[in-house]
């Protein structure tokens, strides 16, 4: 989709009701309900985090969405595909500021180039005991990405047409921090498997976009 057409559509979404948890659950792993039950006491003290779904024009003025591949580490989200984002710092005025700052730190998009539009539905992540607050934004310029090498392995630039393509939805065997591989709903973007909380957030965004595009 051309970015000039997309920018008109995305600005109109601010006034629409969010699809919410019903859309998110379409991409929920089968063990999510069990984990929520196991972690219901921990959830009371869950840590906040903010992420950003950032759209932008590529050098041909087609619309893309950026995701990141996290570095391999000992953490529960090691090497997973996700949105840029992270934990708030004392200098952040609010979670919107956290999402913008983290995007700048992790992939080098200048903070004053990012236009925040609206939040999506927050999502609790049992394995790490975070509540993630997702935001949607865009930049008018093609980003000159600069990765934070300590946290980001690589970036994935996904054409919006692929984001909206139902054929990209699959089931995939993934390794989890809770044991053997599990078959989960996921997206396959040119071999990059997107599952878990990122897929759930992305599905809500897809439903929101389709509420206008499919009228």
Image: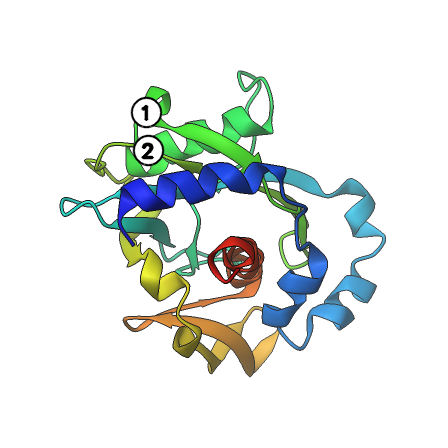
Residue 37 figure quarter: bottom right
Label 1 crowd bin: few (<14), some (14–19), many (20+), radius 10 Å: some
Callout count: 2
The residue positioned 64% from the left and 63% from the top of the image is 23
Name the residue at the left extreme: 59
Asked whether the viewer can see residue 124, the reply is yes
In the image, what residue occupies the spot 44% across and 58% down? 78
* Rendered image: mark on residue 139: 2
Q: Relative to the observer, which residue lies in front, 87 or 177?
A: 87
> Can you see residue 150?
no
Query: In the figure, is residue 44 to the left or right of 63?
Result: right
Residue, disc 1: 113
Task: Give the x, y percent position of residue 44.
Answer: 82, 44
**Percent position (x, y) of residue 107?**
30, 38
Bin the neighbour count of mark 2 within 10 Å (Cα to Cα): few under 14, some 14-19, many 20 and up. Answer: some
Query: Pointer 2 and pointer 1: residues touching (CB < 8 Å)?
Result: yes
Q: Position of residue 137 (x, y in %)?
A: 44, 36
Location of residue 39 in the rendering, given as x and y in whole percent from the top left corner: 78, 58
Furthest-right residue in this view: 41
Is 24 on the left or on the right of 191, as rendered? Answer: right
In percent of the image, x 51 and y 39: which residue is there?
Answer: 12
Q: Secondary structure at mark 1?
A: helix
**Image-quadrant location for residue 168:** bottom left
What residue do we see at 43% from left, 71% from top?
Answer: 187
Tell me if residue 2 comes above or below residue 94 in the rendering: below
Position of residue 14 relative to residue 36, above or below, is: above
Q: Secondary structure at mark 2?
A: loop
The quadrant in which the N terminus is found is bottom left
Residue in front for this viewpoint, 35 or 24: 24
Coloration of the structure image: rainbow
């Amino acid at each position: 989709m051309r970015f000039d057409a997309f920018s008109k559509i995305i600005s109109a979404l601010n006034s629409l009701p969010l699809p919410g948890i019903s859309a998110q659950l379409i991409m929920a792993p089968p063990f999510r309900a069990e984990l929520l039950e196991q972690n219901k006491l921990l959830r009371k003290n869950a840590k906040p985090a903010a992420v950003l779904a950032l759209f932008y024009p590529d050098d041909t003025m087609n619309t893309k969405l950026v995701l990141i591949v996290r570095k391999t580490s000992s953490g529960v989200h090691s090497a997973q595909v996700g949105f840029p984002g992270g934990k708030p710092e004392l200098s952040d005025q609010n979670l919107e500021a956290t999402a913008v700052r983290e995007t700048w730190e992790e992939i080098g998009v200048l903070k004053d180039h990012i236009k925040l539009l609206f939040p999506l539905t927050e999502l609790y992540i049992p394995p790490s005991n975070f509540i993630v607050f997702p935001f949607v934004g865009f930049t008018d310029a093609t980003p000159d990405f600069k990765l934070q090498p300590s946290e980001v392995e690589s970036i994935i630039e996904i054409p919006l047409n692929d984001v909206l393509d139902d054929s990209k939805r699959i089931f995939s065997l993934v390794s989890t921090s809770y044991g053997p591989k599990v078959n989960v709903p996921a997206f396959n973007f040119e071999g990059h498997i997107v599952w878990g909380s990122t897929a759930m957030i992305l599905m809500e965004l897809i439903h929101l976009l389709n509420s206008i595009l499919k009228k």
